[in-house]
Amino acid sequence: NVGGIPEMLYERKSGFLVDEGDHEAWIKKIKLLLDNNQLAKEIGEGARNLLLEKFNWDTVAKKFVIVAESYLSSKKLEH
């Protein structure tokens, strides 16, 4: 549960969030997945779908163009 991870993960849909250094919580989540094949499958599918949705080449390229255009526009305003 650090950095940009909470923005990229949906609890129990595409993974689990645990606080940094909370080894007991980490172990509990791993055991939960090992003991529940259906949940592990659902989370795996959810993570894959999230990646395909947010990080496919079309989406990344469009976001890159928006950032580049914004940057170039700001440079034009400086001159």
Image (cartoon, rainbow, N blue to C red):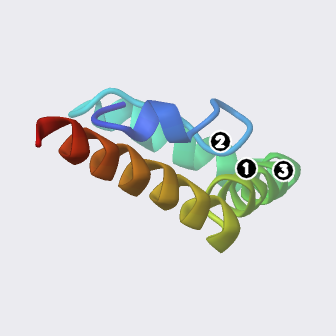
Residue 49's image quarter?
A: bottom right
Disc 2 to disc 3, C-alpha distance: 13 Å
* Alpha carbon separation for disc pair 3 and 1: 13 Å
- Foreground label between 3 and 1: 3
Residue that appears at 19% across and 46% down: 75
Amino acid under disc 2: Leu
Q: Where is 45 relative to 76, above or below?
A: below
Whether residue 74 sits left or right of residue 44 in the image: it is left
Work out whether 22 lies above or below 60.
above
Which numbered circle lies on residue 35?
Answer: 1
Horizontally, residue 36 falls left or right of residue 47, namely right
Can you see residue 17? no
- Tag 3 residue: 42
Looking at the image, which residue is at 49% across and 50% down? 66
Residue toward you, 43 or 7: 7
- Residue that lies at the very extreme toward the right in this rendered image: 38
Q: Which residue is mark 2?
A: 32
Q: Are marks 2 and 1 in contact (CB under 8 Å)?
A: yes
**Front-most of residues 51 and 12:** 51
Residue that sits furthest to the front in the current view: 79
Instruction: Give the residue drawn at x 73%, y 63%.
Output: 52
Q: Quadrant of the N terminus?
A: top left
Q: Position of residue 28 (x, y in %)?
A: 51, 36
